[in-house]
Image (spheres, rainbow, N blue to C red):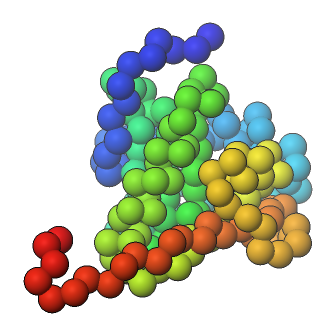
Amino acid sequence: MRPPAVPLRYADLLPGDIPGLVAMIRDVFFEFMAPAYTEEGIAYFLSGLEPTALSARLASEDRFMLVAKDGDILAGAVEVRDHSHISLLFTAKDYHRRGIAKELVRLAVSRCREALPSLTAVTLNSSAFALPVYQRLGFRPTGPRQERNGMVFTPMALKLASLPERKPGDSP
């Protein structure tokens, strides 16, 4: 059943959001991604979802996570490392096909470009399930399907248009 269309709130992940984030990602992962992974891949992926692992990653200055919230419900999340690589992008099953992933990517790319104005591409490693989603968002494969640590993925990139250089006297 699809939730009613209400404005979602997009914000940085807060420590209190982590339990809901982990639950949402686990649900989506087991339904849509885990069937293509080996037992090793499932264990590897889940190890990164441990609250202590998430907290440690997000304490790093080169990472950030944005979430989409519908009231107290976590509807989606994106994690970015090095201001250039999307390491997680998930939308809760009941919120699929509502533009949440698109908005999370847009916001993440904007923040990446603030940190790295000369950024020319944002990369990610797509699961087989998410490949068509990423293609609709403008990402293109940059290499063949691969397997690492039991996880099957396709490397992809979103090429970014160059921003015009500012001239002295231009307003921001």
Instruction: Please name whichever residue, 83 or 30, is drawn nearer the observer in this view of the structure.
Output: 83
- What percent of the width, then of the height, locates residue 15? 32, 49
Q: Is residue 119 left or right of residue 132?
A: left
Q: Quadrant of the C terminus?
A: bottom left
Q: Position of residue 45 (x, y in %)?
A: 69, 57
Q: Nearer the viewer, residue 136 or 78?
A: 136
Task: Pick the residue in front: 87 or 23.
Answer: 87
In this rendering, the answer to whether 160 lies above or below 168 is above
User: Residue placed at 77% from the left, 47% from the top?
Assistant: 132
Q: How many badges with numbers are in the image?
A: 0
With respect to residue 160, does 117 lie above or below? below
Q: Residue 162, percent across and down?
A: 47, 77
Residue 44 in view in this figure? no
Residue 55, image quadrant = bottom left
Quadrant in which residue 23 is drawn: top right
At 41% from the left edge and 70% from the top edge, which residue is drawn? 112
Quadrant of the drawing holding the N terminus = top right
Q: Residue furthest bottom?
A: 168
Q: Is residue 153 left or right of residue 52?
A: right
Going 54% across and 36% down the picture, which residue do you hit? 99
Judge whether 21 appears above or below 114 on screen. Answer: above
**Residue 44 on image: x %, y %:** 72, 62
Which residue is located at x 73 percent, y 64 percent?
A: 140
Residue 106: tell me if it is visible.
yes
